[in-house]
Amino acid sequence: MENNFVPQDVLVMKFGGTSVGTVQSMKSTIQNIKRCKAERPNLVVVTSAISGATNALIKSATDAAAGNLTTAEKTTRELTARHHEMIDKLVNDPNQWLQLKMDINRMLTDFSNFCNAIKILGELSPRALDIVSSLGERMAIRVLAAGVSSAGVPAKAVEASELILTDDVFQSASPDMVRTAEKCKKHLYPLLEQGVVPIVTGFMGATEDGIITTLGRGGSDYSAAIIGVGLGATDVWIWTDVTGVMSADPRIIKDAHTIPYLTFSEISEMAFYGAKVLHPKSVKPCVDNDIRMRICNTFYPDKMGTILVKDSEARDIGKIKAVTSASGFKLVQVAGAGMDSGMAVSAKILSSLVDQGINVPMVIESSSEQAICFPVELKKIDKVKKTLTSVLEKEIQHEDIDLITVSDQVDILTVICSGLKSHPEVIAQTLNGMVEKKFDIKAMSFGPSDVSLNLIVNSADTNAALNTIHQLIHND
Ligand code: ASP
Ligand code: MG
């Protein structure tokens, strides 16, 4: 018989590694799930691995491929101990307690055997790596589901290999959204109908043939968005260990504060330029499907955190919301009087970089086209210099280009403010502040995005410049 149950007002909540990393944080998470379930019955949980697990698993496998099993042995011991302690402290039912301990032991024994096999082969294939790296999530769902059940809320561990259908690009798989939606509905609607909270693995999916894939590091946020879309959810909440998105890095800026509302464009710019708040791919599926996103703190659940809204619902237009920095660049400049032959040289430069797999986060060109400059990550500088001297050989010989210079270390500062184009005074204030303090602005870009202004400054000036800009924020 066809089931017509369609849950309303679905809420998907994703918990990061630190929200499930210790007995104490698991307890907070379980309480948060319990409280939210009481208010929002159609609740689905997605969890990351316990903190540090994914790194340890990956390192075990790569060390095994290099002939060393010590890391795998240590990881097996540590992950056994950490999961067992959680089971001891969180699971009441003796049968469930025993079953769960046996499950964890079996999974870690398989892992240990798998690392042995990797050592014998001397090779770690991308496919094997995804089997290993998704193990943390597969253990976490079992422990969390048992803990939630013990707290009196029916819950069931669900592996996302049942839900998220992906291509076979291991480590960075893409979902088939249509088929994934069908699977999400088929597997999760019945659980919701029975009042059970599905506790789903973040980070992983599977191919058509059921082979495990992963969505990229930090991909559990993306999993939550994918499942949210699949279920027609109204909300996706990301639970983490900070209270939402901050106006600046609080380690650098003492009075940084939580931004209550941010638009999707604003946060996308922030994620791109260094604020590691959300997996960048998680935002778009939510925007496109009108899903409200919230970023909140597992340890301060009553604080609202940050709510992401559509660009059309932007608040505080023309006010700076945040300033972020991305560090570790040098500025490469190519200049020469002969460069003014249209766009040809610039195009040649940029396409040669793309061919070499070098991403440049921004490009600034003088209007005469006699100079072009762009920041390049430190570790790619040598490659860029080599590429440019070879691809521009002719121009250099003909003295059309006389200069390829590389600056000292610089950082990219990004000022986030919706409506910059209609509020040029914000740009003026920012620049005045910088000039007053005599910071050397190496380059700047504004225009392509109405929500961000990028300034390139010497790394030595970064912290002071961030402070200067942060003082401009209207904190009202
Ligand atoms: N556990 C995975 C990672 O560490 C996924 C996640 O945390 O979102 O990358
Ligand atoms: Mg994460």
Image (spheres, rainbow, N blue to C red):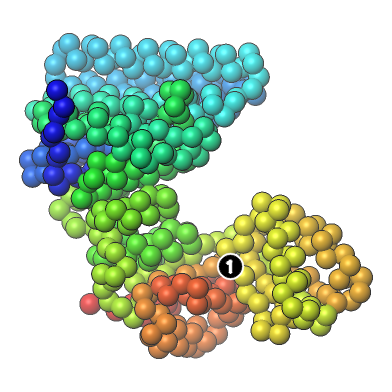
Can you give x and y, in whole percent of width and height, for residue 79 in the image?
A: 39, 24
Residue at 40 percent of width and 88 percent of height: 425
Q: Nearer the viewer, residue 66 or 40?
A: 40
- Judged left or right of residue 223, residue 35 is left
Q: Is residue 223 visible?
A: no
- Judged left or right of residue 334, residue 22 is left
Can you give x and y, in whole percent of width and height, for residue 237 in the image?
A: 25, 49
Work out which residue is located at the far right of the displayed protein and give it: 397
Q: What amino acid is at disc 1?
A: Met
Can you give x and y, in whole percent of width and height, for residue 278 in the image?
A: 38, 52
Can you give x and y, in whole percent of width and height, for residue 454 in the image?
A: 51, 73
Residue at 75 percent of width and 71 percent of height: 344
Q: Nearer the viewer, residue 393 or 410?
A: 393
Residue at 87 percent of width and 64 percent of height: 393
Residue at 64 percent of width and 22 percent of height: 123
Work out which residue is located at the far front of the displayed protein and give it: 1
- Judged left or right of residue 247, residue 375 is right
